[in-house]
Image (tube, rainbow, N blue to C red):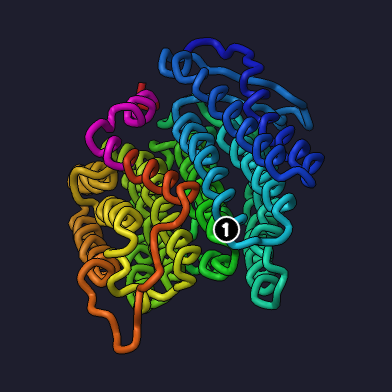
Amino acid sequence: MTTPSESYSLLLALMAPLVGAVLVMLTGRRPNVREACSFTAAGVMFATVASLVKPVLAGEKLVCHLATILPGVSVTLRADCLSMVFALVASFLWIITVLYSLGYMRGLHEHAQTRFSACFALALFGAIGCAFADNLFTLYLFYEIVSITTYPLVAHHQDAEGYQGGRKYLVYLTTTAKGLVLPAMILIYVMCGTLDFSDNIRTGIFPNGTSRVLVTVVYVCLLLGFAKNGVMPFHNWLPGAMVAPTPVSALLHAVAVVKVGVFSTTRVMLFVFGVDTMDAFNLGIPTAYFVSFTILAASLIALSKDNLKARLAYSTVSQLSYIILGVALLTPAGIQGGIVHIANHAFAKITLFFCAGAIYVATHRKNISQMRGLGRVMPFTFAAFAVASLSMIGAPPVAGFITKWYLLVGAIDARQIGIIVVLLASTILNVAYFAPVVYQAYFGKLAAGDSHEGLKEASPALLAPLLISALISVVIGFYPDFFMSFIKGMFL
């Protein structure tokens, strides 16, 4: 790694969604101008993040120091290989989500669209801050910003169900962050004298001779405290947040919130503890088996859900733990498979939620049992759903296959037969809860008295984003090297 160099591009990427949120609020009475501001902010952020690809792949460490709080505690941004995976995915998906939100919110004549767009931009401000955090304090700061700014999105409908889901969301995420992450940060600062991330995924930041008990306690606090990662038992906020409009669900599951959770978890595992410390203190493999319960249990719950968004929500709970499991294997293949799933899951899951929203706008149907034969009148929507489902299952040639392949290789390298069994069992469960949706849509017979007369595909503003994200899932499946090049750069 070369000597850190100051880069104000990091600040520009951070400020783009913040300025965008302000402009959205100022132009709220002119909807077309308001949406143009959202598009512009999203485009600027993605272009800025994309400009960092070449120097990061060349081995440069780009930093931007904003403020010093205490010695060893600062608000500092940095771009490295891990941050680029999350930042590129989040910034690109924001662009197509803005287009989708335009079609969805206007199609249903939703209220408070200005507040919705502004909070959406602020959530991306928090997410990109987490992506580029150079230390645990900066990560925690922006993690909390994401929690606060997404509450109005979860409670958007302002009804009893919305407020209940919003309260659960806020209580779970703020309580775990303040009750577990904050004390862990204090202990780390006392033990290490700094909260800065290591530059080496092997060594971490703990000095030799650090108490094994204290390190283990801190690790458990951080694993559970970053509850946006959806690990059971702190996962109930996620299905409860499904009361929000579908673009918010897409934001929660693919672009920002849950990805902030798993990104924060993997960042801490690799750059605070490090592979060597986790291996020496036997933290990795027990973590892999711990999250395996979430993978299997959430999949079983998903099987029981007739509501499409609820099934997708529990699928997310399960799929997120693949990321943690891969890193916890502590093998190069496992780590690569876990981290690449940040991107692979994002494109597939946002496609699935986009499809769910398009189905609702076009038909006002939410339950899978109501979707028999819909594939014949909405062929493009359900084709995209089928492609994204294959990615979630891990079937070639879609992106999710890359994840499953590396995770299986990682489990073999770690000689963990139990993890191999978990991966195979979860794949069977993935098929069990995704395949019936597609089968019923294309081949299911209509119930007596049911009719699809007058139904058709949703508007192009809804259809185009889901087709784009589905296509990218296929492209990544054929050409995985782009994201893998960043992940392999972490081992240099």
Whether 233 is among the magenta residues is no
Residue at the extreme front of the image, as rendered = 454
Main secondary structure found in the magenta portion: helix
- Is residue 175 in sight in this rendering? no
**Residue appearing at x 71%, y 61% in the figure:** 111
Tell me the quarter of the image containing the C terminus. top left
Q: Nearer the viewer, residue 216 or 319?
A: 319
- The percent position of residue 415, horizontal first and vertical second, equals 19, 49
- The percent position of residue 108, horizontal first and vertical second, equals 59, 62
450 horizontally vs 217: left or right: left
**Residue appearing at x 49%, y 60% in the figure:** 230
Q: Is residue 82 above or below residue 234?
A: above
- Is residue 411 in sight in this rendering? yes
- The percent position of residue 241, horizontal first and vertical second, equals 58, 66
Q: Secondary structure at mark 1?
A: helix
Q: Is residue 202 above or below residue 391?
A: above
Q: Quadrant of residue 6?
A: top right
Q: Within 10 Å of the Cα at label 1, are there few (<14), some (14-19), or many (20+) other Cα atoms?
A: some
Residue at the extreme right of the image, as rendered = 26
75 horizontally vs 221: left or right: right
Q: Nearer the viewer, residue 249 or 444?
A: 444
**Residue appearing at x 50%, y 69% in the figure:** 233
Q: Is residue 302 above or below residue 104?
A: below
Disc 1: which residue = 107
State which region is magenta. 473-489
- The percent position of residue 164, horizontal first and vertical second, equals 67, 74
454 horizontally vs 100: left or right: left
**Residue appearing at x 44%, y 45% in the figure:** 465
Amino acid under disc 1:
Gly
Whether 485 is among the magenta residues is yes
Q: Nearer the viewer, residue 411 or 286?
A: 411
